[in-house]
Amino acid sequence: MPAIHHAEHVGSLLRPPELLQARQAREKGEVSGEELAKLEDDAVLAAIRLQREAGIEVFTDGEMRRATWMAGLLESLGGVVPVEVPTAAWFREDGMPPPEETAFQMVAANAKLTQKAHLTAVEAGFMARHASGQFKITMMSSSMGNLLWRPELSQAVYPTPGDMMRDLVSLRIKEIEELLGLGVNWIQLDSLSYNMVFDADFRARLMGPGAPGPEAILDATVAVDAELVRATKAMNPDVTVGMHICRGNNRSAWMSTGGYEPIAERLFGEVPVDRFLLEYDTERAGGFEPLRFVAQGTTVVLGLVSSKVPTLESQDDLRRRIDEAAKYVPPENLAISPQCGFASTARGNLLTVDDERRKLELVVDTAQRVWG
């Protein structure tokens, strides 16, 4: 049976400045691939050490080798070309950040998709050698693959987004099979297409006037996510599969708002993961009532601690909110985490490493006080 851990974090951690500088130098040809890989290794070792010292028991590599959390689509696929990022406004408490601050490279399919890089296998191999306990591998769900379909580039190869999605699902299942063969026993799918269901404004900004309706998006997203989970469990019933959902996380900014009610019955009833890691750090995520649809025995990891701001949450407030969630999910099936990673994009959120450490320590200490 999947292990129960009551303290977790989503995945990414702040990158060291020297790693960011080296990646820029690599793009200019000023640093070799071997030199960059050594700095990435060092950064992962430091990330493992930070997690261990904070008391985290489920390790990640901090996504130190990735430019963004979307590396599975943006950095690992062949058959794609760079394109402009779709229009998507980002918001912070102090207003909208400058577009150049939140910009990142996007790609679109212009040929049959292939797996050109086995990034997660590299991550898993290193973690297997160096992590001092359980570790997980995070990956973007194929359900977000519609972002890669542009009619002017993709239609000749993939007449519809659905045609392309079949290849993306197949590639992701093969990638998971490779990870399981390497001994990985904990996988986390990051699936944000649900944002387009519960936030109509975000859907319109991202997909334009021709966007499918929320019901069609929900049908397609649930179908793909459920297929990935079932395929993983068919290969290894004992692997822990988690799914993370947030509302965007880029330089401490978010892109959407809305509670889980419009997706809850389908998501929690049809996607058979072991753990849902759900953003819940602000009122943007709504209340806990949708958790009434969570299947018996499934763990809900409450993302109550913000990775966007340095201010440390009150532990009394965190415990009160856990008690509120326990009205809908048995307390033994609850856990706590930050709402998202600390650096979903390489530049990271507007915190320091010391802030990050204190947030993780707060997660661990709260879990120990609540669950022992």
Image (cartoon, rainbow, N blue to C red):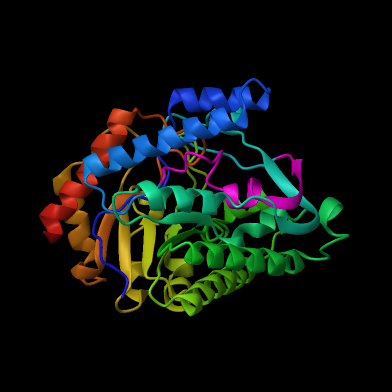
Residue drawn at point x = 21 percent, y = 67 percent? 326
- Where, quadrant-wise, is the N terminus in this rendering? bottom left
Residue 200 vs 105, above or below: the answer is below
Foreground residue, 212 or 48?
48
Furthest residue to the right?
Answer: 156
Question: Is any part of residue 318 visible from this angle?
Answer: yes
In the image, taking residue 47 as reference, residue 331 lies left or right, namely left
Q: Quadrant of the C terminus?
A: bottom left
Q: Is residue 170 left or right of residue 101?
A: right
**In the image: residue 41, left or right of residue 116:** left
Residue 247 visible in the snapshot: no
Asked if the stretch drawn in magenta spans residue 114, the answer is no
Q: How many marks?
A: 0
* Residue 81 lies in the magenta stretch: yes
* Image location of residue 137, percent across then percent down: 45, 55
Residue 218 vs 127, above or below: the answer is: below
Q: Which residue is drawn at the image coordinates 26% and 48% (left, top)? A: 56
Q: Position of residue 184 (x, y in %)?
A: 43, 62
Q: Quadrant of residue 36?
A: top right
Q: Residue at x 57, y 32 (%)?
A: 34
* 293 relative to 34, above or below: below
Residue lying at 46% horizontally and 53% vertically, measured from the top left: 124
Residue 149 coordinates in the image, percent (x, y):
75, 56
Residue 83 left/right relative to 326: right
Residue 349 percent coordinates (x, y)? 43, 33
Magenta extent: 61-84
